[in-house]
Image (cartoon, grey):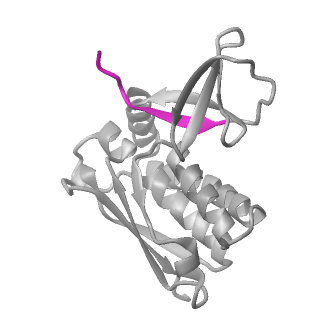
């Protein structure tokens, strides 16, 4: 049996989900499906999720591009930026840049099922004050695979996500660029999060 990859988007918390199907991966995330209510919950994050498959994301990206042309990139980026800022606030709520937040940070990113993130530890980033640059790679990017080979970077939501998280966690103004993307033919997607230069 072949499975399509899906993107899980979070909605407000649902604490009342009953026992159901458990899907889990050690140290990353657990999902519980309630067949009576027909809802899915991420029990690690205590929040309800919905599933969008790659075909949905491709159709969304195509329709935004058709309606807004280059503005589609901005819309997708802003979606990621808003969620990244929320993620940053959650990291600070769980202890900031201390070791106890590290697991939350990594589990939160892993639970998005966007691919395999590789990034420096929060503690190493914060040792000498806010970093001037952070390199992040994403293997098997959901967005790049969903959109396909376009010859340009396509992980706009991830770019916003990383930038928003850095802005809140480090309390500085960052900008994120996708310097490599599987949609351009690169092996992995790579992002450079840098302090924004004054205008």
Q: Nearer the viewer, residue 47 or 103?
A: 103
Q: Residue furthest right?
A: 16
Q: Position of residue 45 (x, y in %)?
A: 68, 43
In the image, what residue occupies the spot 29% across and 20% down?
2
In this rendering, would 51 be left or right of 184? right
In the image, what residue occupies the spot 34% across and 23% down?
3
Vertical relation: 176 (above or below) 112: below
Which image quarter holds the N terminus? top left
Vertical relation: 135 (above or below) 105: below
Q: Nearer the viewer, residue 91 or 24?
A: 24
Q: Residue furthest left?
A: 185
Q: Which residues are magenta?
A: 1-10
In the image, what residue occupies the spot 51% across and 55% down?
77
In this rendering, would 26 be left or right of 91? left
Taking the magenta stretch, the answer to whether it contains residue 181 is no
Task: Answer with the quarter of the image where residue 172 lies.
Answer: bottom right
Q: Position of residue 72 (x, y in %)?
A: 46, 48
């Amino acid at each position: 049996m072949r499975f399509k990859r899906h993107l899980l988007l979070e909605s407000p918390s649902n604490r009342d989900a009953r026992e159901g199907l458990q899907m889990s991966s050690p140290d990353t995330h657990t999902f519980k499906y309630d067949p009576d209510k027909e809802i899915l919950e991420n029990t690690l994050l205590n929040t309800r999720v919905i599933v969008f498959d790659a075909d949905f994301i491709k159709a969304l990206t195509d329709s935004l591009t058709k309606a807004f042309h280059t503005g589609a990139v901005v819309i997708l980026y802003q979606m990621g930026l808003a969620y990244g800022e929320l993620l940053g606030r959650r990291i600070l709520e769980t202890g900031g840049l201390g070791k106890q937040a590290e697991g939350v940070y990594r589990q939160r990113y892993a639970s998005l099922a966007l691919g395999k993130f590789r990034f420096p530890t929060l503690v190493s980033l914060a040792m000498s004050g806010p970093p001037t640059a952070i390199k992040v790679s994403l293997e098997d990017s959901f967005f790049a695979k969903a959109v396909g080979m376009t010859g340009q970077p396509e992980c706009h939501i991830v770019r916003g996500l990383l930038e928003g998280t850095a802005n809140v966690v480090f309390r500085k103004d960052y900008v994120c660029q996708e310097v490599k993307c599987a949609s351009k033919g690169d092996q992995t997607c790579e992002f450079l999060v840098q302090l924004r230069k004054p205008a």
